[in-house]
Image (tube, rainbow, N blue to C red):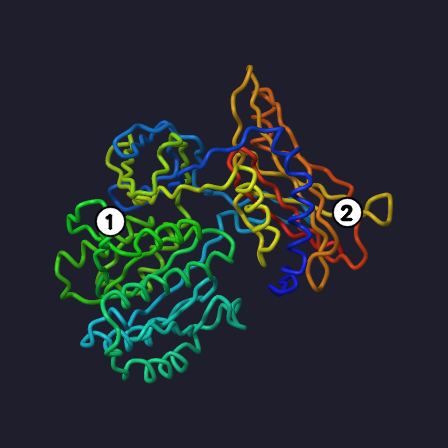
Amino acid sequence: MRYTVLSVMLRFKTLVCSFVLSAAGLLAQGSAPPPLVYLYPVVTDSGGQPVTDLTANDFKITDQGKPETIFLFRQPITKPASLGPHEISNRPAGAMPHSTAIVFDLMNEVQSDRLDNWHSLAKSIPQLASGQSLYFYVLGINGDLVPIHGVESDSGDDATWPQGFDKPFDKAMKKLAGRAQSVQMGQEDQVKKTYHNLEVVGNELATLPGRGDIVWITNGMPSVYNPNTKIPCSGDWVDCGLYVAHVAVTLEHDNVAVNPFSFSGNLSPSVNYDLEQMGRLTGGHGYFREDIQDVLKEVARAAADRYEIAYDPAAENWDNKFHKIHIDCDRKGVKLQVRERYYAFQDSRAPIDREKAELVAAYRSLSDSPGIGLRATVTPAADQKKVHLAIRVNAADVMFRPQGGKFVGALTFLLSDRGGAGPLGDPTVSTLNLNLTSAQRDNMLKEGIPIPQDHPLAAGTTNVRVIVQDQNTDQVGSLTLPVK
């Protein structure tokens, strides 16, 4: 069930107050997680087929030339979850959810290509088998972002929208393509508007479950030199470019990669290189002179085959500068697609505030988060005012620390009653401490971490949202369960 942003915001202050009262006790039971750098490599063999059986020992990572130790490692999810009768999951198809937004960028397309690309898209998009989790925007010549089928549109869940794509697309193009660029727009304005609109689309994709990808149809990478940089400009737009750090941090927070895509066959090697750099900065990939349908298939396949790796740099790493990452794989003959840089933004928030922010975001979200896999069943409890929740947490998504011959972890556990207008009453927040033998951990990796709950329902409750947070990584999973 979806709730309006307004209805959720009405409960926001209550959550913050109730969580502040209990957060100190929760955090005290587990060590505060350090800021982590996350990488999502896609590994393919010489034939371009995905390689999904690698282990953490197969990867070697350096940050600014310094070797790093892998803190968290997850393989791609290759098998659907095995659900019991009446059991539901926040990963119903097995694989992590994923969404893609196409941005057709007229502002950075050369005029001679606009007409051909317009007609190519008008022909190709209606031929897509499905528009599920796919969105389309046009970036106008003067920086206006026009959703043809946007994330926040009334038909956002309509998978059949490509069939009627040509009419609204042609209408928008006739309005936008014939305009001249404003004489007041300088190079810096063009750069700022381009990056801003990529961030806008990234922010919208971030409201959906799972990772997101932007397929950015453009002919060039706009850039302008940052006069305040202390690094001598080498011609590299990442190190020297104005606003690049901002877009990098925003898209990383949104868990969104940019995949530059050019139809044109006349781009210079330097332009191709710059476009590819955007992919390497965000974890995407550059595409050139391919059919849009093939590009979308490749992006979706890469999303399904991503590993998740996190490492814990030293505290002095967070220096508000770009860092270069190098990742090697011991498996011979494989190719990696992974971001090669990140901006080491110094987050001045206390660990408890970072933890709280992730919980609040999951509480406010209009959709469930698949960051930690959850599955559950709901049955009536002996007390008619309660329901029994049989919840299982995917143990492979939880970070355990070896300690004294045991595996130690801690989960923050939040339950929120919800009605037709949004959250009801105060959520309940507690901690589940895990101190497992090797055999117990192995069993939970197979069966999941059980969290049985007899939960009292507030009047008018139709759903209960379960939110689980790993206190070692701050990662969150949520699942909204119908109870009536």
Q: Where is residue 297, by image quadrant?
A: bottom left
Position of 155 with respect to 179 (left or right) is: right
Identify which amino acid the numbered label 1 is placed on: Thr
- Residue 141 location (% of width, % of height): 29, 75
Which residue is tagged 2? 379
Mark 1: few, some, or many residues within 10 Å (few <14, many ≥20)?
Answer: few
Position of 436 with respect to 313 (left or right) is: right
Position of 465 with respect to 384 (left or right) is: left
User: Seen from this angle, which residue lies furthest right?
Assistant: 383
- Residue 483 location (% of width, % of height): 74, 54
Residue in the image at 41% along x and 32% along y:
312
- Residue 217 location (% of width, % of height): 29, 65
Mark 2: few, some, or many residues within 10 Å (few <14, many ≥20)?
Answer: few
Q: Nearer the viewer, residue 315 or 426?
A: 315
Q: Is residue 244 above or below residue 84?
A: below
Q: Nearer the viewer, residue 233 or 472?
A: 233
Residue in the image at 29% along x and 32% along y:
62
Where is the N terminus found, in terms of image quarters? bottom right
